[in-house]
Amino acid sequence: MFSSCAGIRKAEAGRILKQCTFNLDSWTLDSVALDPKLFPATAKEDQSLFPNSQVLKLAQDLLQGKNSAHLGTAWIGAQLQILNASSDTLMIDSLHGLLMLDTLIRTDWLMTQKTVLKPGANSIPLRIVLPMDGRLFHIMEPDTMLLQGYLDARLKSGGSIIPLQFSQKRPTPKDSIRVFIKKAQNDIFQSVLNGWAGSL
């Protein structure tokens, strides 16, 4: 009997999830962590108040997508837009997944707070972790992205947890990413210069 009830709950939650479509937008660069090993050697070579040519070349190559070396990690904020076409609600305790842009980028994302998936439009804040190398500024090249998600949901507050998963291919949000890249270029360039200054 208990097994039957659990199966019914999962089928009902799955029915709601199947009527949802997922999109990512509002990309922002939250923070950058540079690999500290990048700077000691260059700092010893030139103790002036200005970055040496090696540091400037490193930053310029990154911004132009020429640098394939791992320079650190970028934490990116985004909004997961979910359109729930059903007339029912899901309580979401946790949500994480995988974002793939062709073979260029494969990275993890995580919901930053519990949420209620109501009928209609919903917006859920996510945090995406990206390795910071030349690929970061080529993320507009793929036309499609694959979103895979894994969630713990409830049909009602205090109800049993139901593990679910989804996978959807969507068009790349090029307008949103274009705005992100414009700001990220300046922020990352400043982070490289600040990392050099901090190593002196």
Image (cartoon, grey):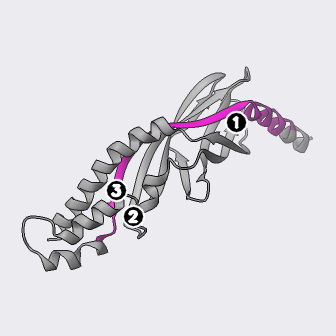
Give amino acid for label 3: Leu
The residue wearing badge 3 is 63
Nearest-to-viewer mark from 2 and 1: 2
Question: How dense is the environment of label 2, judged by Cα within 10 Å: few (below 14), some, or many (20 and up)?
Answer: some
Q: Name the residue under label 1.
A: 154
Mark 2, residue position: 66
Give whichever of 45, 3 is nearer the camera: 45
Mark 2 secondary-structure assignment: loop
The quarter of the picture where the N terminus appears is top right
Q: Tell which of 16 and 153 is nearer to you.
A: 16
Real-space CA distance between mark 1 and mark 3, rounded to the nearest whole angstrom: 44 Å
Left or right: 168 in relation to 14:
left
Q: Is residue 136 above or below residue 2?
A: below
Judge whether 71 appears above or below 44 on screen: above
* Disc 3 element: helix
Residue for point 62% across, 54% down: 102
From the top left corner, tell me how far across and down residue 53 is, in percent.
19, 69
Looking at the image, which residue is at 15% across and 66% down?
51
Name the residue at 80% across, 39% down: 10
Q: Which of marks 1 and 3 is nearer the N terminus?
A: 3
Residue 194 place in picture, x, y as percent: 20, 59
Place of residue 89 in the rendered image (x, y in percent of width and height, measured from the top left) = 68, 26
The stretch in magenta equals 8-36
